[in-house]
Image (cartoon, rainbow, N blue to C red):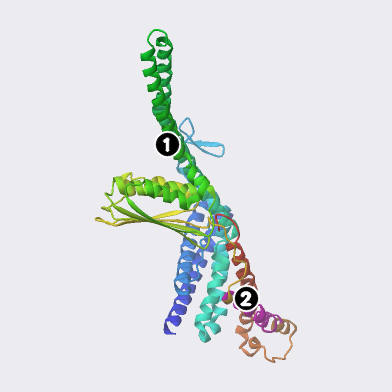
Amino acid sequence: MLRRYGQITALLVLGVVQAAVLALSVPMLLLAFMLGVVLLFPPQVRMVRRLAELNRRLVREWTGLEVESPYLPAPPPPEPEPNGMYRSERTLYKTPRVPAWNNRWKWMVKDPATWRDDLWLLLDPMVKVSLLPVFAVIPGRALLMYAHWTDLLLGATVASRLAGQVSHLRRTRNLATDSQAAEMRRIERDLHDGTQARLVAIGMTLGAVEQLVDTDPQAAKALLTKARESSAETLTELRRVIRGIHPPVLAERGLADAVRALAMDSPLQVTVTVDLPERPESPVEAAVYFAVSELLSNAARHGDARTAAVDISSHGPDLRVTVTDDGLGGADPAKGSGLNGIERRLLAFDGVLALNSPPGGPTTVTLDLPGVLPHEPADKLPRGKAIAVALLWCTAWCPSFPQGVVPAIFKIFGVEEKSWFLALHLPEPWQWPVIFGMITLGGTMYVMAHHLRADHESRHLPTKFGC
């Protein structure tokens, strides 16, 4: 309990800091937009964002509610034109300094989160003051209510999540394009250096057979035997190239049997455990198959391992692959061990790679691909959230109407009746602030009830990449 009161005290102290920042922000905004002192706007935005990030962090640490940052992705650095100049709208500059500043200015002005932060800076101290009675009686629940209020104004919106997704997909698209181009170059090199050379040799051998078939039949037969052997080797080479593009066993029998086939062909003693309720999509299977193939190859060639274990399992809609070997350890993506290529493959599916490879081994690599397995999205509110929404809807009327709107009407029309209206029993200077605080509290409770439901639905959209 004392810890909760200490956290509430820290929030109130932060409210005093907010009031000071607000007193500084208002003249900065007025000077920036009314008198044209535009250089003051970026520092003001950075100052408020740092304060908002501190509030998000405190709420996350104290209540466990994750408040996502809503800011749109920062603009990339300007790129030079073919003539070496940098363009900002219709003006060319010799250096990227001014175009970069213009881009950041537009980014801050057009980001809705910038103005939501300013609105939070204005309203949050009043919300804290209106919650003082609740803070005093039920500090834990009051902190949770305040956390939802923070999420309402400082949390990510559908638009900001979508913008983050677009930025992430743009990066992964570029990585996937680069990986595809590298794969095409590898296939072209394999065909040019292997299959094409063998086919040219077979053609030259058949040309020699045409010349010798009448004059030296024995030599012609020997050359035909050589051509048949070369054609068999060429067919083997082609099958190897095809397996490098998409193994037939993967398409026909699925990921589990394809990985078991990898284990049989590996020089290591590999144990494979697969627990998947349904088959993933074909691109996911291909990415996991080649990742496991690369990891087993690295363990055999670079790790001097003798045994390995592959575990493929599902965690709801998430796919997790763990590959462990008893090699020498010390694997490092910076040393060109193929781990970077695996990460690029996984990024196309929002996947991540976790590596634990101390010197001396063992090496454990975990691949997590979120939301790639078929699943039914959760559409019902959890029990705790459902109770919170019901309580908010059932109790928000009290501060907003009988303790807010009705006393305000009594004050305006000079009605002397005080009844059970809290504000009318207070000294005159406190009546209007308490009335406005009650109306704000009731409206906030209604908005929070709606926000809890809307936020749950936005977080459980049946999309592949999630929110």
Q: Relative to the observer, which residue lies in front, 465 or 262? A: 262
Residue 406 lies, with reference to residue 147, above or below; the image says below
Dot 2 falls on a residue whose secondary structure is helix
Badge 1 element: helix
**Disc 2 packing (10 Å; few <14; some 14–19; many ≥20):** many
Q: Amino acid at mark 1?
A: Arg
Q: Which residue is mark 1?
A: 240
Residues shaded magenta = 384-405
Sequence-first tag of 1 and 2: 1
Quadrant containing the N terminus is bottom left
The residue most toward the top is 215
Which quadrant: the C terminus? bottom right
- Count the labels in the image: 2
Identify the mark at residue 389; answer none if there is no mark. 2
User: Which mark is in front, 1 or 2?
Assistant: 1
User: Quick check: can you spot residue 2?
Assistant: yes
Residue 186 horizontal/vertical position (percent): 42, 34
Residue 346 lies, in percent from the top left, at 46, 50
